Amino acid sequence: MAKRFHEKYQQTPKLDLHGLKHREVFSIVEDFILEKQYDLPALIITGNSIRMKTIVINVLKEYNFNYSEGDLYNRGYITVLN
């Protein structure tokens, strides 16, 4: 069973925002979620930047996507749910 979970996690669409300028993020996230909207859940790796997370969340809210922020041990990503 652990192998199945790991395989599914590897297939999850991911977008890593490390190294991108804040001004670039809105359109990159917008393109990503619209392209992957039928392959959800998807992960958007934001790091711990509050500004980066805010931009991502604003895009998700604009398109009415549900999301969750990280987990107990790692807050540096957002999962796009639907």
Image (cartoon, grey):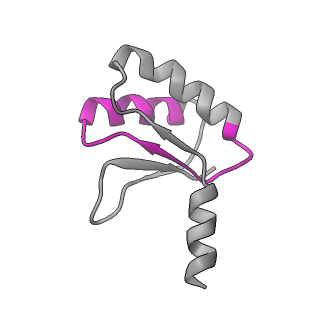
**Whole-percent x and y of residue 56?**
43, 33
**Whole-percent x and y of residue 66?**
55, 48
Instruction: Please state if 76 lies on the left or on the right of 28 as rendered.
Output: left
**Whole-percent x and y of residue 70?**
37, 56
- Along the line of sight, the residue nearer the viewer: 64 or 21: 21
Does 19 lie within the magenta span? no
Residue visible at 33% across and 27% down? 19
- Along the line of sight, the residue nearer the viewer: 69 or 14: 14
Q: Quadrant of residue 9?
A: bottom right
Instruction: Please state if 71 lies on the left or on the right of 79 as rendered.
Output: left
Q: Quadrant of residue 8?
A: bottom right
Identify the magenta region: 36-61
Q: Quadrant of residue 35?
A: top right
Instruction: Please state if 43 lies on the left or on the right of 12 as rendered.
Output: left
For this orientation, the residue located farthest to the right is: 38
User: For the N terminus, which image quadrant?
Assistant: bottom right
Does 50 lie within the magenta span? yes
Residue visible at 69% across and 41% down? 37
22 versus 11 height, above or below: above
2 versus 26 height, above or below: below
Residue visible at 29% across and 58% down? 74
**Whole-percent x and y of residue 47?**
30, 42
For this orientation, the residue located farthest to the top is: 23
